[in-house]
Structure formats: structure tokens, C-alpha cells
Image: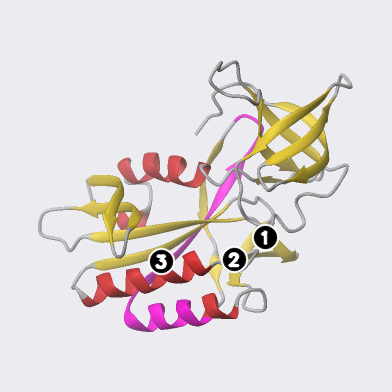
Amino acid sequence: MRFQTELVPARLIRRYKRFLADCVLDDGREVVAHCANPGSMMGLAEEGMKIWLEPNDDPKKKLKFGWRLVDHENGHFTGVDTSVPNRALKMALENGAVEALSSYKTVRPEVKYGEKSRIDFLLQQNGLPDVYVEVKSVTLSRTIGQAEFPDSVTARGAKHLAELTQMVRDGHRAVMLYLVQRTDCTTFTLANDIDPKYHAAYLLARDAGVETLCIGTNITPDSITLGSPLSIGI
């Protein structure tokens, strides 16, 4: 998935009200960028960090920049826009690029299911059980090489696991897919110290037959594409 417009480098001044970030561009201008990430962004919102912004000239948007990447200045990047995983995965699923799900030709995003919820993707194919795929963006890393989820308490995430469990009980396949938007991680685990209830909900779902996939990403200031699977240690 290529960014719609060329990203520009900046330095973070501060992130506030969850969805706003004050930044300074290379030419010295201070701008406010939209931050499409409701999580804590632990370790990714420190003053002075190099970041990449996407400009826009859409008259309907109040903010003319969107915060897309953190540049760790060591060759690695983290994607902070939580809308990216679903966009990147939609193309990958339609192209059969996710091996475990490549037999499914019909990809339906945002289908109603469960209790007033929408599944990220419902995959269908004649002769095969439907697959309900829930996607989570992973950006936390507190140990070198290891990605973690979640970065804050997520009651909504635990609810999604319970709904996936019910889909398995109803005779369908259900997949919890963690997309790691970091290029510096090779393993994945759950941050059970941050949200023990989510960890417990995950174990119940896994024992009930909910499948787990964890996929990395290739990130540059030009694009974000799916990478290789990460080893899962939960």
C-alpha cells in the first residue's frame, strides 16, 4: 500500500487529546497533525522523535497533515496509523497473499456480526467454512526484537475475542490476526501485565479453536506492505 501523497519529515513536539500532535517541519514551520491512533502509543510519542507526515489538500479536512510513521533513525520504522492494517490486508487477502487464508476468493470487509459489532473481514468460498478475521495493529515493543499487544487496556478487544469464540462454536473458522507495524521485531507476545483480562480472554478463545496469525510489515516513507510471519510466544 503506497501513501497517497509524498510524506514529509518532521520532529514531534507533543501528542495530546489522543488524536492531535504538534510537530515542527524541517523548514521550521510548526503544524498540527491528525494522529489516527487511539492507543497509548507507548514509546512512540516522545518529544523530539523523528516522524513522517502525510500532507493533504482536502478542503473537507481541518488538519492538513496526518502522522503516519515514527522513524527510529536506525533504519527501522513504526507505522502509527491504525487504519493502515485493514487497507493493506484487504489487498493482500484479495490477492491470496496470506497463505493460511489463500483458498478464499470472496473478501467482505466490515460485516455485521456478534453483539452490535463488525468483523474486519468475512472470507467466503464454496465448500469451505466461513472465516471471521479480526485485525489488530501492533506497535508496542519493550524488549528488543519483540512486539507486544495491547499497549493499553482494551475491553473492546476482549469483547472481539469472545465474539470470535462464538463464531467457532457456530461452526465457522475465526482468526485473530495481529499485524505488527514495526520493522524491528521478529517475535510477538501479549502484554499481559498491561491488560490481564485481554490475556485471559485470548487464552479462552485460543482453547476454543480461534486461530492466531501474526504478520510483520515492510515500512518505508513510500509504502507499507505485508512482510513475513512472526513467531508467536504466548
In the rendered image, the vertical position of residue 197 relative to residue 88, given as above or below: below
Label for residue 182?
Answer: none
* Cα distance in 3D space between marks 1 and 3: 20 Å
Nearest to the eye among marks 1 and 3: give it. 3
Q: Quadrant of residue 4?
A: top right
Q: Earlier in the sequence, mark 1 or mark 3?
A: 1
Q: Residue at x 61, y 75 (%)?
A: 195
Q: Position of residue 57 (x, y in %)?
A: 60, 15
Q: Which residue is mark 1?
A: 140
Left or right of residue 166: residue 47: right
Q: Which residues are magenta?
A: 200-222
Colour pattern of the rendering: secondary structure
Quarter placement of the C terminus = bottom right
Q: Position of residue 43 (x, y in %)?
A: 77, 56
Q: Which amino acid, mark 2?
A: Phe
Q: Which residue is mark 2?
A: 149
Q: Residue at x 87, y 19 (%)?
A: 27
In the rendered image, the vertical position of residue 181 relative to residue 51, given as above or below: below
